[in-house]
Image: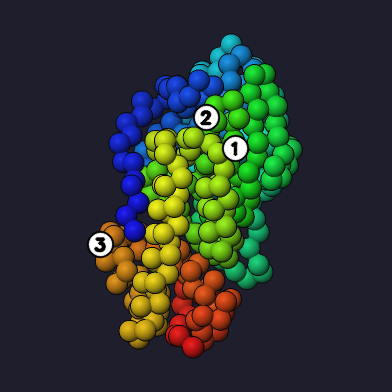
């Protein structure tokens, strides 16, 4: 299933740009294979404002965001999740503004003896925890927290009711799909959270990386169909006798640059963890990157 990705995005780094009547964006200069053109930090409101996803711990980005709200009062700092390109700058911005930091919780801890992916903000601690459906009220704006685990278990989207917009973090992005990396990344949760946001009424999705998605329902449906197609590709590999994730990645992601294959392998592992839990696939031990897999 072809996802109608939005690759046209040319930010002016450090300068605030209007996205909706209530939302401005300042993009950090941290482009990469996983952040696209950089992390977008959002400002909601005018006069008394909220900052969403402060971004990486980069002094020039922190200064640019603080310049964007100069003369205004920051009343809230909201964090979608605790990867290193989203939450670390919350410390500097909270110190500079005195605003409390809101999030689902700290960075999830892996099971004993299990190594997780790099890039987690393990020092993050919110001042206020938010749960699904809880509402934060500001001066002329209202934000609802929408729990969307999958990419990471503490992921939140933020619905800005007055603009009928959903700030989607890394849950739904216009330029790429999200990496689902076990043990905390969970494919079953991700599918459920995709269907959850597709059932909502917001007319525009605004991811932390890249451009806004102005027709979100068919876009998210394409996301889901793409993942279902990936499931069939993995099962096809198993039917053909490919038993290891590296062998399956080499076939399924043949058109993808090889330096991205390790990340692709993490998402493939997430599918296989789900298959093993459902009894659709067998593993020669716990489902890991190094395990061997086969059909029952």
State the residue in front, 115 or 210.
Answer: 210
Residue situated furthest right in the rendering: 128
- Is residue 119 visible in this depiction of the protein? yes
Label drawn at residue 193? none
Q: Position of residue 164 (x, y in %)?
A: 55, 31
Q: Secondary structure at mark 3?
A: loop
2 and 3 marks in contact (CB < 8 Å) = no
Identify which residue is drawn at 50% across, 81% down: 281
User: Which of label 1 and label 3 is nearer to you?
Assistant: 1
Dot 1: few (<14), some (14–19), or many (≥20) neighbours within 10 Å?
many
Identify which residue is drawn at 60% across, 69% down: 114
- Is residue 93 visible in this depiction of the protein? no
Label drawn at residue 42? 2
Q: Earlier in the sequence, mark 2 or mark 3?
A: 2
| Corner quadrant of residue 235 | bottom left
Identify which residue is drawn at 54% across, 22% down: 22
Q: Position of residue 104 (x, y in %)?
A: 68, 45
Q: Position of residue 87 (x, y in %)?
A: 58, 40
Identify which residue is drawn at 42% across, 69% down: 231
Separation (CA) of disc 2 from disc 3: 34 Å
Please name the residue that numbered disc 3 is placed on: 255
Residue situated furthest top in the rendering: 71
Q: Earlier in the sequence, mark 2 or mark 1?
A: 2
2 and 1 marks in contact (CB < 8 Å) = no
Please name the residue that numbered disc 1 is placed on: 158
Picture mark count = 3
Separation (CA) of disc 1 from disc 3: 34 Å
Tell me: 2 left or right of 162: left
Q: Earlier in the sequence, mark 1 or mark 3?
A: 1
1 and 3 marks in contact (CB < 8 Å) = no
Q: Position of residue 98 (x, y in %)?
A: 69, 24
Separation (CA) of disc 2 from disc 1: 11 Å
């Amino acid at each position: 299933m072809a996802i109608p990705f939005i690759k046209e995005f040319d930010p002016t780094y450090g300068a605030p740009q209007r996205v909706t009547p209530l939302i401005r964006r300042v993009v950090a200069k941290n482009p990469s294979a996983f952040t696209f053109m950089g992390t977008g930090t959002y400002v909601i409101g005018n006069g008394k404002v909220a900052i969403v996803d402060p971004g990486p711990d980069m002094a020039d980005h922190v200064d640019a965001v603080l310049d964007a709200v100069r003369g205004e009062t920051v009343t809230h700092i909201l964090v979608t999740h605790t990867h290193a390109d989203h939450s670390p700058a919350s410390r500097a911005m909270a110190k500079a503004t005195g605003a409390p930091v809101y999030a689902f919780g700290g960075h999830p801890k892996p099971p004993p003896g299990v190594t997780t992916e790099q890039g987690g903000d393990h020092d993050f601690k919110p001042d206020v925890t938010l749960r699904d459906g809880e509402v934060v009220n500001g001066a002329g704006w209202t934000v609802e927290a929408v729990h969307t685990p999958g990419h990471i278990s503490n992921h939140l989207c933020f619905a800005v009711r007055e603009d009928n917009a959903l700030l989607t973090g890394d849950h739904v992005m216009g330029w790429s799909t999200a990496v689902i990396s076990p043990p905390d990344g969970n494919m079953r949760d991700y599918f459920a959270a995709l269907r959850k946001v597709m059932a909502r009424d917001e007319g525009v999705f605004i991811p932390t990386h890249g451009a806004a998605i102005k027709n979100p329902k068919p876009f998210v449906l394409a996301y889901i169909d793409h993942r279902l197609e990936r499931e069939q590709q993995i099962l096809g590999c198993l039917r053909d006798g490919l038993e290891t994730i590296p062998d399956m990645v080499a076939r399924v992601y043949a058109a993808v640059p090889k330096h991205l294959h390790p990340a692709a392998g993490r998402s493939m592992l997430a599918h296989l963890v789900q298959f093993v839990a459902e009894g659709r696939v067998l593993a020669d031990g716990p489902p890991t990157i190094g395990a061997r897999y086969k059909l029952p």
